Image (cartoon, rainbow, N blue to C red):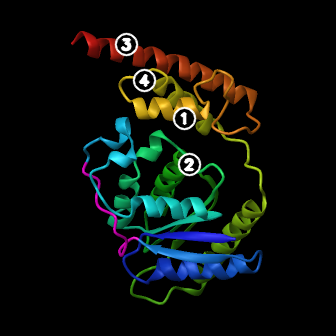
Amino acid sequence: MKILVIMGSPQKGNTFRACEDLHNLLQEQIPVEFEYLWLKDANLLPCKGCYVCIPRGEDKCPNHDAAAAIEQKMHEADGVIFASPVYGMNVTGQMKTFVDRFCYIFHRPRFFDKKAFLLTTTGALGSKEVLGYLETVAGVWGFEVAGRAGLIIPPGTTPAPYRVTKNRKVLSQAAKEFSVALRRKKRKSPGLMAIIIFHAQRAAFSQMETVSPCDYQYWKTKGWLSRHARYYVDVPVNPLYGAIGNIVEWIQARNIRKDLQGAAIS
């Protein structure tokens, strides 16, 4: 199994060592090969906020960098690890630049056959917030989030034995969950929030043929604008979740129509 590590740390510190520990733990379950993509060394330019990639397509982005090659690496991997230490209660600047650069994927998700693992390290606080942010990013991009670990490693000291033991336990359990997911070929059924996001996006993009033609054509080509599509991929969907999603879609579509009509009048 080929695993791509998107490394948000600017140095080979706690986050890198945690990834190496995860590598060893996974090797006890399944054969895996890690490839590190160090964002600090990647030719990835900051997003200009020009909005060109959303309505016109990512190939129209004025930034000429390695974004396309990096996306291809994610497609070629069996699983992707998003790894970042906590900086200021958030991901590092390098990781945020990475997420911003691929913002078009929020509109046009594509990694539905990939598993994601989320890893953070912190001196005290922030793991919950960073893991939550990364889970939103990976989930909306299409990944099945199949493992997560937030490790507390106090800076400048030798961690207390209980902390080392706890971190090891957290990482070991997460590695088992990730290995099970990597062996499983089928995707798990989506949760309620994933269904709501699908229906909310369909409500928006179904009405944006002229406003955001790239999004509209992408969704149309994928077959997601069809009323028969219950989710991005063919997996069992909880009927209750589907019903809630349809209600959300109806409300969202109505609001978007009002916004578009208002824009046309003004």
Q: Which residue is mark 3?
A: 258
Sort mark 2 into few (<14), some (14-19) or many (20+) by Cα contacts within 10 Å: many
User: Three-letter amino acid code at disc 1?
Assistant: Ile
Q: Amino acid at mark 3?
A: Lys
**What residue sits right under mark 4 in the picture?**
209
- CA gap between label 4 and label 2 equals 25 Å
Question: Which amino acid type is shown beneath numbered disc 4?
Answer: Glu
Rounded to the nearest angstrom, the CA distance separating label 2 from label 3 is 29 Å
Disc 1 vs disc 4: which is toward the camera? 4
Q: Which residue is mark 1?
A: 197
In terms of sequence position, does the residue under pointer 4 or pointer 2 come before the other? 2
Q: Closer to the N terminus: mark 1 or mark 3?
A: 1
Q: Nearer the viewer, mark 4 or mark 2?
A: 4
* Crowd tier of the residue under label 1, counting other residues whose Cα lies within 10 Å: few below 14, some 14–19, many 20 or above: some
C-beta proximity under 8 Å, tags 2 and 3: no
**Place of residue 63 in the rendered image (x, y in percent of width and height, measured from the top left):** 28, 56
Residue for point 73% across, 42% down = 189
Percent x, y of residue 39: 39, 70
